[in-house]
Image: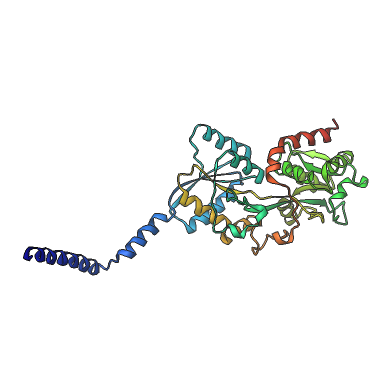
Amino acid sequence: MKSMLGKKAVLLLTVSGVAVSLVACGANPTTQSKDSASAASEPSGTLHFYTSQPDADAAALVKAFNKKYPNVKVETFRSGTEEVVSKLLAESKANNVQADVLLMADAPTFVRLKKQGLLMSYKSKEGSGIPANLKDPGGDYYGTKIMATVLMVNTNDVKSLPSSWKVLTDPKTSGKSIMPSPLYSGAAAYNVGVFSRQSDFGWDFFKQLANNKVTVSKGNGSVLKSVASGEKDYGMIVDFMAAKAKKQGSPVDFVYPSEGVPVITEPVAITKATKNPIAAKAFEDFILSSAGQKVEASRGYTPIRQGIKAPEGLKTIDQIKIISANPDQLETTREADKKKFGEIISGK
């Protein structure tokens, strides 16, 4: 009995000594545990960001992100959407995906990547600020901005702004309009898919455009050049390009037609193969947050969150009447839609 009491006394003294030591050091076991967990979840390390954004836009986004998370080194790969997707698919085929975060193109492109099992589902805490029809319901991708296709006119030749897309099919405008080719521009391909699925447009709209001798150019840049120079009076073009040209003094103006406008959203997503999920989630959260959306607005794009001021000359998301179609269906039929458009325009 004496021996057992002696052991208990030693044990109590040992425990007391440890507690005294911890108190003396100012340490709290609970606090230490929380601090360790916090340190482990703090974004850091390298993040591989694949995007089709212009270089300056991607750089501005990364710079703003790094102000909040300076311990994350973002390595950006920037190219056209098709090349970004090709690189990603090649890496996937080699079972060596390097990308952590993707930001490019439109929802159908991300539907394609989701079907191939390349995206990670992530319910971003900022996702509730994004309209339901502009994000994936499972959290695989989220739209990041609004890029609407609008109707632009040359103000030297057109004195009264039209209010409807139907001005392009009016015989009075025969040979005076231009649009980007869906065979070249991803945004134009998306627009064809959307317009052809609207009850008041359909494929008849494109047949009427063909009959009215619409010119089909490569991309939005050639549409801007043609209308600004007065070669054509009317053009279908993304809104931020028209707004920028108008602000710089080109003789152009633009409208959001009353029937509504198709929009692409340059979604963001995290790859399932990400090696840095903590930083990837922080980056996606930042892009969708008010701070990230203000960066997009500063680059000339309409923010996708309500309550963020749009750039001068552009409407905010709650002021735009958006026409859309099912992204899954658009992804499935994209090539068929482009083929049919080509046949209609060429008269075959």
Q: Name the residue: 71% across, 42% down.
A: 330
Q: Name the residue: 55% across, 50% down.
A: 59
Is 102 above or below relative to 301?
above
Residue 310 at x, y percent in the picture: 68, 60
State which quadrant residue 85 falls in.
Answer: top right
Tally the marks.
Answer: 0
Residue 161 at x, y percent in the picture: 85, 56
Taking the image as shown, residue 49 lies to the left or right of residue 147, namely: left
Front residue of 210/3: it is 3
In which quadrant of the rendered image does the N terminus lie? Answer: bottom left
Taking the image as shown, residue 181 lies to the left or right of residue 62, namely: right
Residue 301 at x, y percent in the picture: 66, 55
Taking the image as shown, residue 340 lies to the left or right of residue 30, namely: right
State which quadrant residue 211 falls in.
Answer: top right
Residue found at the very far front of the displayed protein: 1
In which quadrant of the rendered image does the C terminus lie? Answer: top right
Residue found at the very far right of the displayed protein: 172
Residue 261 at x, y percent in the picture: 76, 52
Front residue of 146/67: it is 146
